[in-house]
Image (spheres, coloured by chain):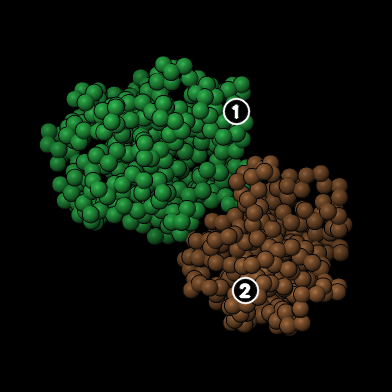
Chain colours: A green, B brown
């Protein structure tokens, strides 16, 4: 394939927005990949709730309930009556499937192994070979702390990208977003090689969490910061560039096309201090698994979930941009304080790049109770 | 150059060498007690000191495990250096000596985007240090060089060397820079040659090896050879695109060179 350089090529929208928002860094998207057509249902989210899904005392999920939630969610999303047909909307037996888990809050809060195991079970049921399914995360220590292997067929690879941490060997030198945020020396964020060279499809499995920089972290951030190198450079002092960086990364091909399904695991969540679990008191239990092809819609709904929980706990809003909430360093264990000015506007910005539907009045949230 | 280095080592017996410019041990430090905007390591490199005193003799007195880094730095900047090191590091010294002999002496003419006139002040020194640290290639000149991409005066009037360095980078633009190193905050580059034949010297000041570097050099080149100390790495995933030559390096321990030849 001939290499092509897109200077904001896939993103005319940011250039247009630049006329009204001077705070958009100059992004240069370099990718030889083009958009692929896959099954999409923009603006639709299926939220399956079950009070029985997790025991808040032991924090153990019930695998049978999780299986039922997964089944009802996939059928609800696709309108199919047979589970295999629902999965075949997204996956073919010949696919090589990456499952992007989120382990930044592990082991306390992460993509639940029962959810991941159920995804793998369904993929193999439609004919994908276990060796062609790969569980992946950027950092090895976080991934290992979960222990997914106990729950999966031993042929399913479970691999971290940065071994050792900081190594960019497993990132694709041909596919990157270049930007200078704060004068940093390394201005490239490269996409994971498996995404560009190995996977034909990706299933994104984020959690429901507050995020000190991005406001919330759900589908978009797990796609973006979870599939590129050198992303922490987007924050400095109280300033974070997550508003535009998350959507820009998530819209870069082939990641944008190959994430065909988002399964947002909200059995447990984090209402403050995310993406990590700074204190167990910041963990809460939405007991929801959300299914969607639209990362923007799911994240728009996530804002309300996190805001509601924060409000109930007396925390400030994720939209609070006042300077008096800021602390000078470290991560705040006081839910009325934060190190960064959060940028939940990254979700609307991602919508402007064509990644999904942000308008709450246009989002169809099908709620299912199990 | 390694032959001079070897000769110099032979005459050094722990006594002060007259007329040598003393260089601190190269390496990195994390200085959490120093106010800093980033977690980037503090790199102690001497490329700028060597450039400032070109033609002089240099001497290092390095602690354990640093001799190879000092040798790499001296070779990268073609410095006539004398290195004092702990006796137990003799095997490391021998190993690096063998490597330097293997790669052979490269060109000694420094290539640089920026022609610098400087006043020798501490502020100017810190600014040149930051140029080196940021892989902003420069040559110290006595008068403006019309062939340089930029001519800059670096003197004691500079209030903030970091800000000044960044302003120079912005004026130069990243697109026009002679070299970019992606994937490491501790690998610094020096380029020698005549534009047709170029040797890229890559020195890793970090405490551990760096994996998966990507290097971009302005201009269209073919890779003639590459070699890395204590590693079988080779420059790979080579491409020429958008006015630059790029390649990856799977692993760099302390030192490596990539020899390029201009495409016709």
- Residue linked to disc 2: B89
Q: Is residue B181 visible?
A: no
State the CA–CA distance, disc 2 to disc 1.
47 Å
Quadrant the N terminus of chain B occupies: bottom right
Going by the image, does B127 lie left or right of B224?
A: right
Evaluate if marks 2 and 1 touch, with contact meaning CB atoms under 8 Å apart.
no
Residue B61, compared with residue B131, is above or below; it is: below
Find residue B136 and report its image quarter: bottom right
Q: Which residue is mark 1?
A: A327
Q: Does residue A64 appear left or right of residue A279 in this picture? A: left
Q: Quadrant of the C terminus of chain B?
A: bottom right
Pointer 1: residues within 10 angstroms few (<14), some, or many (20+)?
Answer: some
Q: Which mark is residue A356?
A: none
Q: Position of residue A329 (x, y in %)?
A: 60, 34
Q: Nearer the viewer, residue B44 or A137?
A: B44
| Residue at x 77%, y 53% (from the top left corner) | B127
Viewer-side label of 2, 1: 2
Q: From the viewer's perspective, is A344 left or right of B245?
A: left
- Residue at the (44%, 30%) spot, across then down: A279
Task: Check the residue under mark 1 and report the chain it is in.
Answer: A
Regarding residue A321, the answer to whether it shows in the image is: yes
Query: Residue B97 at x, y = what percent?
Result: 63, 79
Residue at left 62%, top 74%?
B88
Task: Please tell me which residue lies in front, B253 or B150.
Answer: B253
Relative to A237, residue A92 above or below: below
Residue B36: x, y in percent?
67, 43
- A119 or A61, which is in the foreground? A61
């Amino acid at each position: 394939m001939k290499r092509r350089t897109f200077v904001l090529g896939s993103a005319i929208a940011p250039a247009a927005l630049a006329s009204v928002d001077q705070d958009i860094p100059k992004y240069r998207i370099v990718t030889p990949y083009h958009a692929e057509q896959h099954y999409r249902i923009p603006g639709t989210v299926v939220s399956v709730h079950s009070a029985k899904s997790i025991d808040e005392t032991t924090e153990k999920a019930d695998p049978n309930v999780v299986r039922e939630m997964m089944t009802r969610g996939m059928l609800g999303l696709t309108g199919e009556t047979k589970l295999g047909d629902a999965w075949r909307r997204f996956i073919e037996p010949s696919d090589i499937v990456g499952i992007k888990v989120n382990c930044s809050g592990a082991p306390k809060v992460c993509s639940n192994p029962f959810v991941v195991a159920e995804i793998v079970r369904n993929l193999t049921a439609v004919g994908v070979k276990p060796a062609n399914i790969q569980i992946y995360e950027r950092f090895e220590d976080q991934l290992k702390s979960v222990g997914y292997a106990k729950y999966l067929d031993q042929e399913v690879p479970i691999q971290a990208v940065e071994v050792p941490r900081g190594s960019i060997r497993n990132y694709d030198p041909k596919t990157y977003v270049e930007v200078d945020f704060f004068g940093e020396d390394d201005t490239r964020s490269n996409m994971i090689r498996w995404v560009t060279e190995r996977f034909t499809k990706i299933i994104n499995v984020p959690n429901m969490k507050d995020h000190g920089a991005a406001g919330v972290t759900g589908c978009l951030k797990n796609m973006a910061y979870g599939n590129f190198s050198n992303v922490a450079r987007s924050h400095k002092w109280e300033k974070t560039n997550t508003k535009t960086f998350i959507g820009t990364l998530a819209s870069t091909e082939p990641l944008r096309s190959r994430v065909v399904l988002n399964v947002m695991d909200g059995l447990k969540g984090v209402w403050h201090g995310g993406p990590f679990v700074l204190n167990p008191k910041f963990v809460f239990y939405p007991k929801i698994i959300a299914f969607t092809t639209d990362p923007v819609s799911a994240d728009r709904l996530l804002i309300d979930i996190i805001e509601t929980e924060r409000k109930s706990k007396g925390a400030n809003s994720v939209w609070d941009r006042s300077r008096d909430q800021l602390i000078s360093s470290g991560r705040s264990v006081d839910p009325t304080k934060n190190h960064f000015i959060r940028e939940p506007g990254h979700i609307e910005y991602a919508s402007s790049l064509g990644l999904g539907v942000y308008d709450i009045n246009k989002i169809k949230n099908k709620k299912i109770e199990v | 150059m390694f032959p001079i280095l070897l000769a110099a080592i032979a005459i050094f017996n722990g006594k002060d060498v007259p007329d040598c410019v003393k260089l601190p041990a190269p390496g990195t430090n994390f200085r959490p007690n120093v106010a800093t905007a980033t977690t980037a390591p503090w790199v102690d490199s001497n490329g700028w000191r060597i450039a400032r005193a070109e033609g002089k003799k240099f001497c290092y007195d390095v602690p354990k495990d640093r001799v190879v880094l000092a040798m790499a730095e001296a070779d990268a900047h073609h410095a006539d250096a004398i290195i004092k090191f702990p006796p137990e590091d003799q095997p490391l010294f021998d190993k690096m000596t063998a490597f330097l002999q293997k790669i052979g002496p490269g060109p000694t003419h420094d290539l640089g985007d920026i022609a610098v006139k400087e006043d020798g002040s501490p502020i100017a020194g810190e600014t040149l240090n930051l140029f080196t640290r940021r892989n902003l290639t420069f040559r110290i000149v006595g008068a403006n060089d019309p062939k340089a991409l930029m001519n800059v005066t670096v003197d004691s009037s500079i209030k903030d060397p970091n800000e000044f360095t960044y302003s120079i980078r912005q004026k130069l633009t990243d697109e026009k820079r002679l070299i970019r190193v992606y994937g490491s905050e501790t690998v610094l580059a020096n380029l020698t040659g005549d534009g047709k034949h170029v040797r890229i010297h890559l020195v890793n000041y970090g405490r551990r090896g760096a994996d998966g570097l990507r290097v971009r050099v302005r201009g269209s080149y073919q890779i003639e050879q590459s070699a890395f100390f204590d590693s079988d790495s080779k420059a790979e995933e080579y491409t020429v695109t958008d006015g630059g030559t790029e390649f990856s390096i799977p692993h760099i321990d302390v030192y490596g060179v990539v020899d390029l030849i201009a495409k016709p």
